[in-house]
Image (tube, helix red, strand yellow):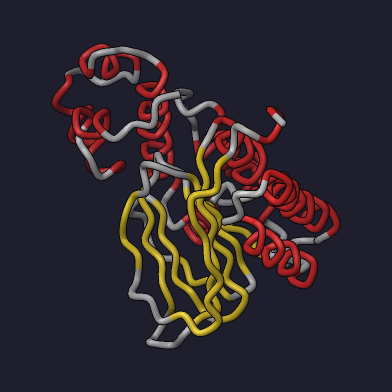
């Protein structure tokens, strides 16, 4: 059925006592969901500061970003992953999972249901049988539904988590706006120093650094769909010259604009 044909699973596994060395890489050829059922994990996105995560937790890997993650202090972890490609894969990640995890990760509030779904998907993913492939796609969408429902019913432990997540989403949606973080802090009843501390705790970066990073990823995504020179791109994003734009792009993305273009997934 054509409905299921625009998503292809390319790999996946579930390892109960994983001792894989830490990952520090980009994955430009596919999208991925990483699910940790047990263990303590560090996670960093786009060269930001490492955040310590306690399982059960899921984190999303997107081709446009760089990731560094692994288990903490030599312990082992129960780690699973799924990789997939295709237009449907892109929609599920960008329009489904990523809005639920604006920082790149999210706690799994219903690990029983999510784990059962993940196990079912692993069992179906490598089959060449059309029916089992269809079931695997359905299970992937069911995993998304479990996260949506659990987040809807779960009240955050920190009273400022929804505030910071809301600001993060606004920055990601409109990165070219000249945001006044002092004014944002005041609007939310916070001093700027307290706001900055909270923001860094949730994202691993100070507000302005996060904004610059978001702008560079916006520029990277722009390059995926527009045939545009680096000089033109620098002008669009408000840089006085190509060199300063390229320097920041490489710092935030990990590759120069020219080298990044060579790794793109074509739409």
The answer to whether residue 189 is seen in the rendering is no
Looking at the picture, tell me which residue is in the foreground, 155 or 180: 155
Looking at the picture, tell me which residue is in the foreground, 153 or 57: 57
As drawn, is 213 to the left or to the right of 76?
A: left
For the point 50% across and 40% down, which residue is it? 85
Q: Quadrant of residue 99?
A: top right
On screen, 262 above or below 241?
below
Q: Residue 52 at x, y = what percent?
A: 49, 72
The answer to whether residue 238 is seen in the rendering is yes
For the point 55% across and 48% down, which residue is it? 9
Residue at the limit of the structure toward the front, as seen here: 129
Residue at the limit of the structure toward the right, as seen here: 153
On screen, 18 above or below 85?
below
Q: In which quarter of the image is residue 230?
A: top left
On screen, 205 above or below 23?
above
Q: Residue 194 at x, y = what percent?
A: 53, 57
Q: In which quarter of the image is residue 25?
A: bottom left
For the point 59% across and 38% down, which residue is it? 7
Looking at the picture, tell me which residue is in the foreground, 206 or 1: 1
As drawn, is 36 to the left or to the right of 41?
A: right
Q: How many numbered dots are placed on residues in this image?
A: 0
Q: Residue 86 at x, y = what percent?
A: 53, 34
As drawn, is 84 to the left or to the right of 247?
A: right
On screen, 172 above or below 123?
above
Residue at the limit of the structure toward the left, as seen here: 243
Quarter of the image with the N terminus in it: top right
Quarter of the image with the C terminus in it: top left
Looking at the picture, tell me which residue is in the foreground, 182 or 8: 8
Q: Residue 260 at x, y = what percent?
A: 26, 34
């Amino acid at each position: 059925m054509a409905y299921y044909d625009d998503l292809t699973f390319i790999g996946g596994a579930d390892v109960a006592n994983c001792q894989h060395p830490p990952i520090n890489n980009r994955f430009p050829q596919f999208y991925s969901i990483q699910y940790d059922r047990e263990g303590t994990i560090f996670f960093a996105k786009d060269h930001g500061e490492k955040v310590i995560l306690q399982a059960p937790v899921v984190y999303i890997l997107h081709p446009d970003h760089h990731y560094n993650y692994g288990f903490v202090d030599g312990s082992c972890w129960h780690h699973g992953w799924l990789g997939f490609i295709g237009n449907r894969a892109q929609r599920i990640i960008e329009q489904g999972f990523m809005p639920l995890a604006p920082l790149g990760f999210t706690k799994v509030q219903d690990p029983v249901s999510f784990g059962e779904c993940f196990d079912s998907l692993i069992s179906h993913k490598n089959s060449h049988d059309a029916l089992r492939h269809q079931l695997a796609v359905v299970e992937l969408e069911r995993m998304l539904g479990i996260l949506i429902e659990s987040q809807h019913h779960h009240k955050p432990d920190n009273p400022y988590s929804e505030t910071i997540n809301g600001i993060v989403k606004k920055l990601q949606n409109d990165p070219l706006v000249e945001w006044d973080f002092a004014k944002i802090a005041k609007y939310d009843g916070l001093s700027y120093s307290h706001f900055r501390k909270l923001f860094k705790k949730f994202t691993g970066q100070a507000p302005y650094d996060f904004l610059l990073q978001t702008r560079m990823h916006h520029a990277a995504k722009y390059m995926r769909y527009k045939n545009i020179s680096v000089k033109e791109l620098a002008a669009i994003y408000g840089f006085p010259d190509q060199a300063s734009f390229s320097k920041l792009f490489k710092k935030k993305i990990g590759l120069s604009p020219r080298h990044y273009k060579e790794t793109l997934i074509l739409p």
